[in-house]
Amino acid sequence: MSFLRLLSRNRLALAGLVVMALVVVLALITPLLPLADPDVTNTADRFKRPLGDAGLLGTDHLGRDLLSRLLWGTRLSLAVGVAAALIAATIGAAIGIVAGFYGGRTDNIIMRGVDMLMAFPYILLALAIVAALGPGLLNALIAVAAVNIPFFARNIRGVTVSIAHKEFVDAARLSGMGDVRIIVTEVLPNVIPVIVIAMSTTIGWMILETAGLSFLGLGSQPPQADLGSMLGEARSALITNPHTSVVPGAMILVIVMAINLLGDGVRDALDPRLKSGALSRPMPATLVRRDSVPPQPRTEDEAILALRDLKTEFHVKNRVYKAVGGVDLHVRPGECLGIIGESGSGKSVTALSVMGLVASPPGVITGGAVYFEGQDLIGAPYETLRRLRGNRVAYIFQDPLATLHPLYTVGEQLIEAVRAHHPTSRDEARTHAIDLLKSVRIPNAETRIDSYPHELSGGMRQRVGIAMALANDPEVIIADEPTTALDVTVQAQILSLLDDLRRERGLAIVFITHDFGVVAQLCDRVAVMYAGRIVEEGPTAAILGAPAHPYTARLMACVPELGGGRRELAAIPGLPPVVDNLPQGCAFADRCHKATDACREGEVTLVPKGPDRAVRCIDPEIATEAAQ
Ligand code: ADP
Ligand code: MG
């Protein structure tokens, strides 16, 4: 179980677990041990020292065997503490779930009641409850449970509120489930870890509180021993016979320490954010683990950016996802290269690998090279990458609402982008930012610069994203589906804007998309990606005119043509392979209509086909034409 594995990685928690297990086993087997009767007094043997003739731990002020009293007392204290915790957790969680789930007036009434309970100092409240019910262990248990209910109620309500508005709860409601069923099947499973965490961190506290009440004589009544009453009775002999108080005191210390260490460990192991790795910070650059460096290709000397046999993997637990499995690409100044492929084919990971932006862990670059102006960026020192990122190689992402900071104006963010690489005065940077907004054709740039991201439309925000990418006059822009979230007219405007920019500034653009229409409009060359590899590459017109790889052909058949008359729209059957278990040979074979056994045997290589084209297929669609 992963929970136990996580827990065992925490040494202190493990120590706590071992100690607690020992204590619990001792408490459980106490009735079976050959112990003296804990309640039999023997005044002749009062205050015997430990390790003497009267038992291992000596005797107390009435001559009772301390070892026996300690074990029986521990048993009682643990039972009361755990029972109090269970009761408080159950009632508190129930209150919290009802309040959080129903909200509104129910929530208000319940939580104000809870607030009133919380307003009392809880130890006074516990004393008041015991005073009202009368002294006794059961009443002490009730008091301790009662004063801890508000803590659970508050905690669980908070969690429930956030869950009650999630889509899966709405979906359960739409499917006609009743409230009780929704609470039990949808809400409760999500709340239980929080309940367990709250319990594990408070149980030690509740044992202490019960001991406190017993210490004051309000809990267990003589002659019955629990740890608190043992301490209370030993109090008067604290100086003369310290062992009578040290024995129960040490046990309380050990139990509470062990429970708290264990509780912290349980919390860390159960916290879902820790499991997803959200609290482990990614490294500033992707981890590189490669054996050899492929040389820069001679034929692509004039290319500003060239990828050689790039391999990027994700190492998750003992799985290896080969997201990018050996990609060769290059782009020249002023050229636009399109990368096209289905979702999950590795386009984004390829793009992010260029600047070492794939999150590590779990990402690892395991091979290949990325040459930018002849310099290999894979494994380059972080400082080198930092100087290039956003300065000479800039990115545009799909969703500008997610990449722009919501609490700063777009102007402030543009100024920050400029000043990150070119330390200029704020005024200069602001003038530059206004120019940038103008260059991406944002009307009234002087006033728009003080807008917040939410005040702009999607198209405007994406223009800001482009302006930010242009801020430092980069040589290369990598655009990862920048128009996918936009409607067609805005998309057309953004595309023509990018086209103009690259012609004016000689920008090299790597444009990632899954849309052949966009490729046709903007790109000079296109690379088709499938399962982490390039399956076909060449000039856009040539590929759109006569696709060579069956995958490209079928992808294009999926695109409806306006005014192209009625024709059947083909969907590609099946799904792309999962990249942690790629098939032998051609990854597309299982979905290909002309696959033969030969396709599934050996590695299929990318072979040149005609001028400037290459295809990774042993039986390409245009075998004859390409041979001309
Ligand atoms: P796309 O072509 O849609 O941009 P991506 O490059 O985002 O595809 O993803 C490529 C592959 O890498 C996918 O199969 C995806 O499941 C896998 N992948 C991406 N990020 C991670 C990650 N953090 N952990 C494991 N696998 C990942
Ligand atoms: Mg993507």
Image (cartoon, rainbow, N blue to C red):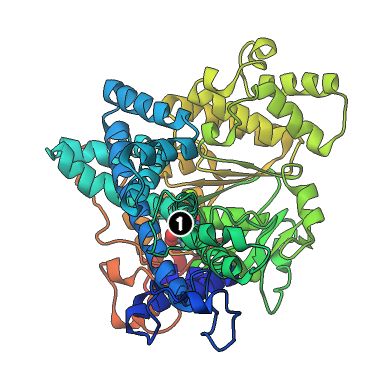
Q: Where's residue 461, x and y in %?
A: 55, 26
Instruction: Categorize mark 1 by other alpha carbons within 10 Å: few (<14), some (14-19), many (20+).
Output: many
Q: Is residue 480 visible?
A: yes
Foreground pick, 315 / 120? 120
Res 413 quadrant in image: top right
Q: Is mark 1 within 8 Å of ligand 1?
A: no
Against 98, residue 246 (above or below) is below
Q: How many marks?
A: 1
Against 337, residue 82 (above or below) is below
Against 55, residue 535 (above or below) is above
Is residue 61 rendered to the left or right of residue 570?
right
Q: Find the residue positioned furthest to the front.
A: 44
Q: Secondary structure at mark 1?
A: helix
Foreground pick, 83 / 345? 83
Q: Is residue 439 visible?
A: no
The residue carrying mark 1 is 207
Q: Where's residue 214, x and y in %?
A: 45, 53
Q: Where's residue 494, x and y in %?
A: 54, 29
Res 380 quadrant in image: bottom right
Q: Quadrant of the N terminus?
A: bottom left
Foreground pick, 428 / 536? 428
Image point 76% across, 42% down: which residue? Answer: 391
Foreground pick, 294 / 525? 294
Is residue 387 rendered to the left or right of residue 155?
right
Against 585, residue 611 (above or below) is above
Q: Where's residue 189, x and y in %?
A: 29, 52
Amino acid bearing label 1? Ile
